[in-house]
Image (cartoon, rainbow, N blue to C red):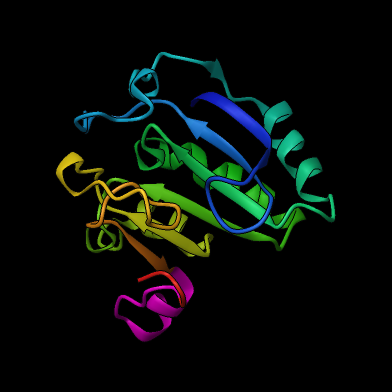
Amino acid sequence: MRYGQIRKYDVANGPGIRTSFFVTGCSANCKNCFNTEYMNPNYGKLWTEKETNLIIDYLKKDEIEGLTILGGEPFESVRDLIEIVRKIRDKSDKSIWIFSGFKYEVLINNKESKKLLSMCDVLVDGLFVEELKNLKLKFKGSSNQRTIDIQKSLEKNKICILDGYK
């Protein structure tokens, strides 16, 4: 798996101060995507154990509320992310948000994607749609996107929007 960047402190991609990383590779090609260079799966650096350990170290800091995984498209690197997130989860119980252009309904019906989802807390799903762009939304780009409480959704077997994120 390759990545475009790691942010030790990120306040734009989830509540509080978070650590985030951006996976590269995305086949969606959304009009006016804000991360066009991250569409290329060969862009960026190769992820190693060093990066996993760096994320774990960042998450040990009291001021860090959690981790956010973005892209590109994280679920195009699902196998690698399962292993990375498993190692992170072994060392941290802080919240994990993950962003995807794929809808929850699609992800939940794929064995590997469901496994990755089950290790995360919040999914922001749906492709960015330029015509539905809304700068007033919390941590999303367009009004078709949803902020889903993954654990509650898995438990109730229905989509549950995270409280406070219509």
Outermost residue toward the left?
Answer: 131
Where, by quadrant of the figure, is residue 154 drawn?
A: bottom left
Q: Is residue 141 above or below residue 40?
A: below
**Residue 82, position in %: x, y?**
51, 47
Q: Is residue 55 magenta?
A: no
> Is 7 rendered above or below residue 158?
above
Q: Residue at x 56, y 18 (%)?
A: 46
Instruction: Give x and y (percent) for residue 105.
Output: 23, 63
Residue segment shown in magenta: 150-162
Left or right of 61, for residue 88: left
The residue most toward the front is 136
Apparent side of residue 166 relative to residue 60 in the rendered image (left or right): left
Q: Is residue 159 found inside the magenta-colored segment of the image?
A: yes
Which quadrant of the view contains residue 146? Answer: bottom left
Q: Position of residue 155 (x, y in %)?
A: 42, 82
- Seen at 37% across and 43% down, the residue is 75
